[in-house]
Amino acid sequence: MVFLSGYAGSERERAGGVPHLGHDPFGARLGLQLTLQPDRLFLNLFAGYEERRYGGQEPLFGVNRKDRQTDLRAALSLKLSAGWSVSPQIAYTDNRSSVSLFKYDRTIVSVALRKDF
C-alpha cells in the first residue's frame, strides 16, 4: 500500500497586532506499507515535509519567521495472536527555522501493544 497527499492551509491570529503568530502551512506526506510475512509482519514507512510562512516579523528577532519541517518514521507491526500485535517504532523530526529559537530535532523510539476487539 502506498499513499501520497498534499495540503495547504491558513492559520490566522485572533488578536490584532500579532501577525507573527499566524501562518500559512503547506506540505506533502508519503507513506508505504510493505508485507514482510503475509498476515503477520509489516513494515510501515512515512515521510512528511511542511513549510510554514508566518505573517509578520518576530518582535524579539526582527525577522519574518519561516519554518521547514521534515518528519521520518519507520515501524514494524507484528501480529502476535488473534487481535494482538506489537509495533516498535522510530520517529525523527527536524525543524529548521529562520529564527534560531524555533530550530530543533528530536528522535522518539516507542513500542505499542495493541488489542483489536
Image: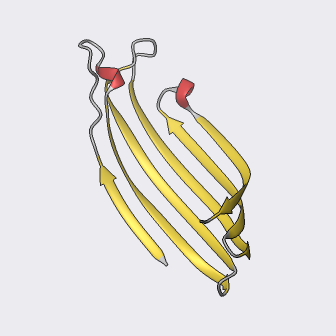
- Name the residue furthest front: 117
- Name the residue furthest bottom: 38
Q: How is the image coloured?
A: secondary structure
**Percent of width and height locating residue 112:** 70, 56
**Percent of width and height locating residue 85:** 70, 68
In terms of depth relative to the viewer, which is nearer, 61 or 39? 39
Residue at position x 37%, y 63% in the image: 5
Q: State the count of labels.
A: 0
Vertical side of 62 occupied by 86: above or below: below
| Left or right of 31 on screen, residue 108 | right
On-image quarter of the C terminus? bottom right
- The image quadrant that residue 17 belongs to is top left
**Percent of width and height locating residue 82:** 69, 76
| Left or right of 34 on screen, residue 20 | left
Vertical side of 17 occupied by 116: above or below: below
| Left or right of 88 on screen, residue 116 | left
Residue at position x 65%, y 73% in the image: 43
Residue at position x 28%, y 44% in the image: 9
- The image quadrant that residue 113 belongs to is bottom right
